[in-house]
Image (cartoon, grey):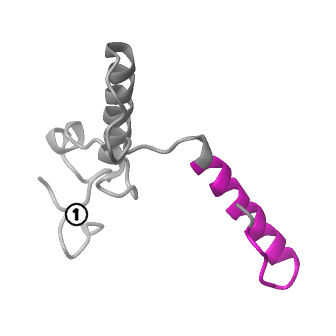
Amino acid sequence: MRRTPRSSEGGCRRGNDYVGEAASANSRTPFAHPEGFIEAFANIYLAAAGAIADQIEGNDLPAGGYDFPIVDDGVAGNAFIKACVESAQNNAAWIRLNL
């Protein structure tokens, strides 16, 4: 790995042009993305694949459910964002979040 004056004091960081070809080829996430970014999505896909396989095989729902967001989670997230926008438009007033 080669270092240049633009390198950070703590070492080289992924996604920068001073990182060598071998390091770049093995870096899965772009510069400024957290290290677990790809793994987080992989975990969601793995859980979803398990749910699909269970449905196809006729297996019962696991006791704790599956570990991925469902439509209700998206609806709650959108309600939260709507309340944030409404709060910002009203001088940061508290807004009741109805879920």
Q: Quadrant of residue 68?
A: top left
In this picture, residue 91 sits left or right of residue 5: right
Q: Residue at x 19, y 74 (%)?
A: 10
In this picture, residue 94 sits left or right of residue 65: right
The one nearer the camera, 24 or 57, is 57
Residue 40 spot, x, y in % from top left: 34, 47
In this picture, residue 92 sits left or right of residue 67: right
- Three-letter amino acid code at the position of disc 1: Thr
Residue 77 spot, x, y in % from top left: 63, 56
Q: Residue at x 77, y 62 (%)?
A: 82
Please determine whether, in this image, residue 60 is positioned above or below residue 62. Answer: above
Q: Quadrant of residue 63?
A: top left
Residue 78 spot, x, y in % from top left: 69, 54
Residue 77 among magenta residues: yes
Residue lying furthest top: 56
Please determine whether, in this image, residue 57 is positioned above or below residue 32. Answer: above
The one nearer the camera, 17 or 69, is 69
Residue 17 spot, x, y in % from top left: 31, 50
Residue designated by label 1:
4
